[in-house]
Image (cartoon, grey):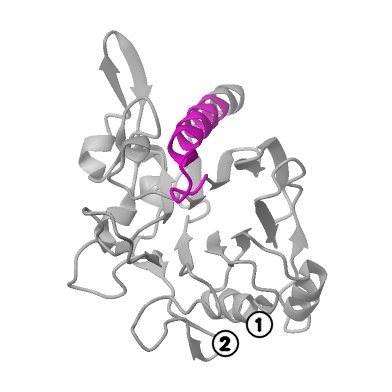
């Protein structure tokens, strides 16, 4: 199961780029934020080259659009910031687009949204008796920010060996961890240096940000194909970067990410 996520920046002409990424990476599920292009056109474009996909139900979550080639995908909770999808009755895919940091109310709105999403995930994991959970989307924050790392929020750990304990008890309350592999993209040893570039006036601005992320429960680590986690910089035979090496806003201000969760090699942990 190969998944693509991209915030498409309300680009009405984005379909050719999406088609190229899907074909080049053999994508089976496409998750899009800020998508306003013609999805029927995209589905037709893919079918003409032998990639048959259909749209999944996200009614109630206008910020996310999902399509894919998998048949056994059922909708779970749909809220303004999340779309839960249950795959093969075992795996939980939580697709998110959280409030932006640009607006003054964004921080509090994001905290409330994350708390709600965590509650929804825990409830669905209990219902499915499975911790095969993936969170993917535009977090509008970096992996090191509070809502990503704090135990009361996503609790996304940068080191898998620390996350394999699965839970941590704080003040006599148990919190369940995620593993966040996106930490591996930080630093300047390898480009691109993130998925989003912002040269703002904040004194602690790092310029490059990893707002587009995937988090997985530790039980999925053996199915997660490390080398297939990528920040994509080419599509439709064109660079997605401008002449300065930043995301080309004529296409999108975010770079897409792809990753793979291998099917059936390891049993799901219940």
Mark 1 vs 2: CB contact within 8 A: yes
Magenta residues, as a range? 99-121
Determine the image quadrant of residue 77.
top right
106 magenta-colored: yes
On the image, the x and y values in percent for residue 15 come to 68, 77
Q: Residue at position x 55%, y 78% from top?
A: 251
On the image, the x and y values in percent for residue 203 come to 21, 54
On the image, the x and y values in percent for residue 140 come to 44, 50
- On screen, residue 124 above or below 141: above
Q: Main secondary structure of the magenta part?
A: helix
As rendered, which of 134 and 187 lies closer to the eye? Answer: 187
As rendered, which of 235 and 203 lies closer to the eye? Answer: 203
Answer few, some or many: residues within 10 Å of disc 2's Cα (few below 14, many 20 plus, some between 14 and 19).
Answer: some
Along the polypeptide, which appears first: circle 1 or circle 2? 1
Q: Which residue is mark 1?
A: 16
The residue sitting at the top extreme is 172
Task: Give the SS element for disc 2.
Answer: loop
Determine the image quadrant of residue 3.
bottom right
The residue sitting at the bottom extreme is 237
Q: In the image, is 76 to the left or to the right of 212?
A: right
Q: Which residue is mark 2?
A: 236
Q: Residue at position x 61%, y 23% from top?
A: 127
Q: Quadrant of the N terminus?
A: bottom right
């Amino acid at each position: 199961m190969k998944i693509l996520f991209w915030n498409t920046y309300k680009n009405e002409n984005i379909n050719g780029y999406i088609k190229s990424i899907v074909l080049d990476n053999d994508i089976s599920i496409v998750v899009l934020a800020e998508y306003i292009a013609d999805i029927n056109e995209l589905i037709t474009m893919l079918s003409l080259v032998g990639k048959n996909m259909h749209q999944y139900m996200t009614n109630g979550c206008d910020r996310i659009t999902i399509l894919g080639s998998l048949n056994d995908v059922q909708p779970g909770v749909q809220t303004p910031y999340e779309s839960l999808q249950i795959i093969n009755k075992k795996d939980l895919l939580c697709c998110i687009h959280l409030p932006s940091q640009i607006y003054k109310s964004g921080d509090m709105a994001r905290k409330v949204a994350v708390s709600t999403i965590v509650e929804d995930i825990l409830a669905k994991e209990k219902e499915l008796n499975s911790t095969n959970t993936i969170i993917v989307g535009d977090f509008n924050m970096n992996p090191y920010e509070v809502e990503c790392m704090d135990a009361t929020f996503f609790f996304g750990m940068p080191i898998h060996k620390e996350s394999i304990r699965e839970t941590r008890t704080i003040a006599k309350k148990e919190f369940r961890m995620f593993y966040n592999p996106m930490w591996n993209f930080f630093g300047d040893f390898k480009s691109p240096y993130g998925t989003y570039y912002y040269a703002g006036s904040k004194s602690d601005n790092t310029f490059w940000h990893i707002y587009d992320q995937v988090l997985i429960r530790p039980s999925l680590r053996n199915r997660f194909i490390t080398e297939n986690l990528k920040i994509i910089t080419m599509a439709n035979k064109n660079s997605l970067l401008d002449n300065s090496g930043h995301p080309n806003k004529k296409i999108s201000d975010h770079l897409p990410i792809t990753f793979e969760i291998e099917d059936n090699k390891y049993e799901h942990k219940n």
